[in-house]
Amino acid sequence: MSFRSRVLRYRRRVLNLDQILETAIAQGLDRFSMVAVARELGVTDMALYRYVGSREELYSRAAARAHATQPLGAEQTGWRAHLLEVAEQTWQLAHRHPGIERYLLDGPYHPETLQIFSESIARFRAMAPEFTEDQAYVLLSRVVSVTLAGADNALSRRWQTDPDEPSDLFRWTVRALVDGMVAGLDDLPGDGSARALGPESAVSP
């Protein structure tokens, strides 16, 4: 048996899901392939299917892993400042992991992601107990959705003086959104239909 064959056999023996997820993340959520991940790990692409059923499942799991690295938001003096910080952190997350937008906007979500969403809502309500859980979700989700829509927008990138920082135009847009939501708090939907997440949105752990 050649040296290469012995190395490949050893790598197959120690292959695990964590290695697969981290390799997919490193290659890029918007560009990795099963073949490329397998090649990087020194195994055949068929070996990956013992851990994930498809490229789409690997994408969802890798996106969930990448999302779990995002801070929940620094302590702020008020909920408005917290929403602006959430926008900044979400922009940086999308900047580090192009392609994560589809997962965060559309799901289906890994249970760990749903847990992070719940913790984010609880954190927000601790700063602003006057809001119901559904109202907090609406405020947070609108900021995150607008941020993800603008994070990889060609028009927005035209005005970035620093490619690693949001543009002033983007930050103005988020501030205007938050100010508009503040002005419309009396009309904020408070019913459960405002929330799109639930157990049916989750993928298997």
Image (cartoon, helix red, strand yellow):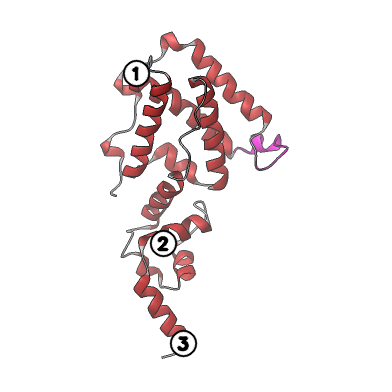
User: Residue 107 at what x, y percent from top left?
Assistant: 38, 41
Of labels 3 and 1, earlier in sequence is: 3
Residue 108 in view (yes/no): no
Q: Gap between marks 2 and 3, in whole Å?
A: 23 Å
Closer to the eye: label 1 or 2: 1
**Residue at image mark 1:** 132
Q: Residue at x 34, y 38 (%)?
A: 114
Three-letter amino acid code of the residue under disc 3: Phe
Q: Residue at x 45, y 58 (%)?
A: 22
Under circle 3, the secondary element is helix
The 10 Å Cα crowd at callout 3, few under 14, some 14 to 19, many 20 or more, is few
Q: Gap between marks 3 and 1, in whole Å?
A: 62 Å
Q: Gap between marks 1 and 2, in whole Å?
A: 39 Å
Looking at the picture, does residue 199 appear above or below residue 15?
above
Task: Describe residue 93's horizontal placement relative to residue 48 as left or right.
Answer: right
Dot label at residue 45: none
Q: Residue at x 55, y 20 (%)?
A: 177
Three-letter amino acid code of the residue under disc 2: Ile
Q: Residue at x 45, y 35 (%)?
A: 72
Of labels 1 and 2, earlier in sequence is: 2
Mark 2 touches mark 3? (CB < 8 Å): no
Looking at the picture, does residue 61 appear above or below residue 51?
above
Name the one closer to the observer, 128 or 179: 128
Question: Over which residues does the magenta segment extend?
Answer: 153-164
Three-letter amino acid code of the residue under disc 1: Thr
Dot label at residue 3: 3
Under circle 2, the secondary element is helix
Of labels 2 and 3, earlier in sequence is: 3
Residue at the limit of the structure toward the left, as seen here: 199
The 10 Å Cα crowd at callout 2, few under 14, some 14 to 19, many 20 or more, is many
**Residue at image mark 2:** 20
Q: Quadrant of residue 42?
A: bottom left
